[in-house]
Amino acid sequence: MSEITNEMFNLNQDALRDTSVKNVIMREYRSETTPTDNELNININVRDTSEWIDLSGSYLEISGTSKGTGGNSLASGAAATNSALENGVSSIFSTSRLRVSNTLVESNDVYSHINSFTKQLMNTADDYARSIALNAGFALDTTPQAVSDKFVLGGVAFDTRTVSDNPQYNSGFTTRKGQFGLTTAARKRSTFHLPLRTLFSFCSVSKVLKGCPVRIELVRRSLEQMMFGTTAEPFFSLDKISLWVPIVQPSLEVLAGLESELARGLSVPWSYVNWRTYASDASTATTRRWTYTTISEKPLGAFLVCKLSKAAGTNEKQFNNMIFDNADVRRAQIVVNGVRYPYQEYETNWSSGTNQDTSRVYAGLMEYMEKNKSELDGGSLINPFNHSSLYPFYYFNLHNLEETTAGHQISVEVDLNTAPAENMTMYLVVLSDTQFQVVGGLEGVQVLKK
């Protein structure tokens, strides 16, 4: 056994101080056009190719006003404005694409809202949820209902009235409604700050870039799809979106080293864990077998979750895409290149009675939480109770998957006990080891696909 000396006895070690950064300036880049209720496409460009930029510290500033169905006016009263964003300002986008050096670095088409929500849910600790995530409009639902009444009043006669907790009270919805929703006829302006890494995993790489243009392409969901509540109004009318980017000024010594390195011809691989969401066809079948297109990157893990379609006659705003369904799944397993994960399939009983058995699925989910917490240290937002009722995610650990140059084909096998009342869609969020080649010269840095 080797012996070590406690750090408190290391008296000769000087204090460390970072002098490599001379200054950091936040610079705003606005969208090409002013957002309107009728325009779904939003593009932002960064063309300061002579500056060192840090995408890992960048964020989107998203502003808008609450608007009624008739335009600027809103109905008066709390009951008339029981509505808020679905969950997180990132949920307003269906598609998000990032281009660096004219290279499409990352794209999440159609299901960007599911992708970004899953990333926040899995990587957010409680303290982060009450600060930075909340500033991005993210507050976890605690029930499926859009109910803000914390207590219910019972009894009829004055001397027999009782007050009890309301089991339908949704604290997450209430918080989001407080950020945005209204109780009066006045319009309210709301501003959210969304870290760019929430949409794009590439922006989690803490490296500076220079000489390469950056372009962000977003597609907004419809006004009805963005909202969750029991009333027709308000809507979130987006009127401004801009990207704030740290412009980093290195010290003279560091700058000389960077320029010397670029002059010699930089060529290094960058890697990061990319998140991308795929969706199956919607069906009421109890036996589901689904294979999607082979991906070239090595999968490191995958989350699986089910979502029932909204019932006929249900208003779009009463349907929350960020609350999921267990779909009475009996068994679940994925197959990658012919190998099954987990080796012994997940077997579950999601009933709320005495036979409920979901602990192994929850334990598998916590395996990811314990190894990959990327934000502040702390506990998971998912507990055994909201896991079974609101966020029944499965996690499949694929870190030990053998690499192959032929690509990786993933198949999903799910069996249900009973046919769902509505069509059920399966979402598979795949985490993959993605690499790019970064090359540099006198003009700066270029990001190229490997």
Image (cartoon, grey):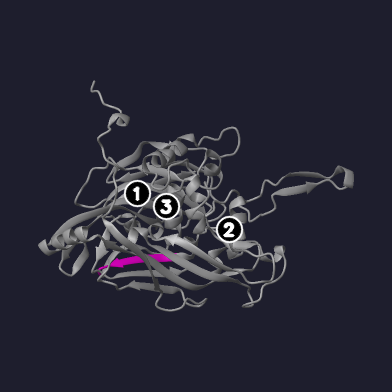
| Relative image position of residue 382 (x, y in whole percent) | 50, 43
Mark yes or no: residue 139 visible: yes
In which quadrant of the rendered view does residue 247 lie?
Answer: bottom left
Q: CA distance from mark 2 to mark 1?
A: 37 Å
Q: Secondary structure at mark 1?
A: strand
Q: Secondary structure at mark 2?
A: helix
Mark 2 residue type: Arg
Q: Mark 1 sits on what residue?
A: 411
Mark 1 residue type: Ser
Classify residue 302 as left or right of residue 228: left
Which comes before the other along the chain, label 1 or label 3?
3
Q: Residues within 10 Å of mark 1 (few under 14, many from 20)?
A: some
| Relative image position of residue 367 (x, y in whole percent) | 40, 38
Q: Residues within 10 Å of mark 3 (few under 14, many from 20)?
A: some
Q: Marks 2 and 1: which is nearer the front?
A: 2
Q: Residues within 10 Å of mark 2 (few under 14, many from 20)?
A: many
Q: Please tell me which residue is depicted at 45% across the width and 38% down the height of the picture.
A: 361
Q: CA distance from mark 2 to mark 3?
A: 19 Å
Q: Quadrant of the C terminus?
A: bottom left
| Relative image position of residue 363 (x, y in whole percent) | 44, 36
The region drawn magenta spans 94-101
Q: CA distance from mark 1 to mark 3?
A: 22 Å
Overall secondary structure of the magenta section: strand
| Relative image position of residue 180 (x, y in whole percent) | 59, 63
Q: Dots 2 and 3: beta carbons under 8 Å?
A: no
Q: Please tell me which residue is depicted at 30% across the width and 55% down the height of the picture.
A: 205
Q: Mark 2 sits on what residue?
A: 176
Disc assigned to residue 340: none
Q: Dots 1 and 3: beta carbons under 8 Å?
A: no
Mark 3 residue type: Lys
Classify residue 182 as left or right of residue 265: right
Q: Mark 3 sits on what residue?
A: 119
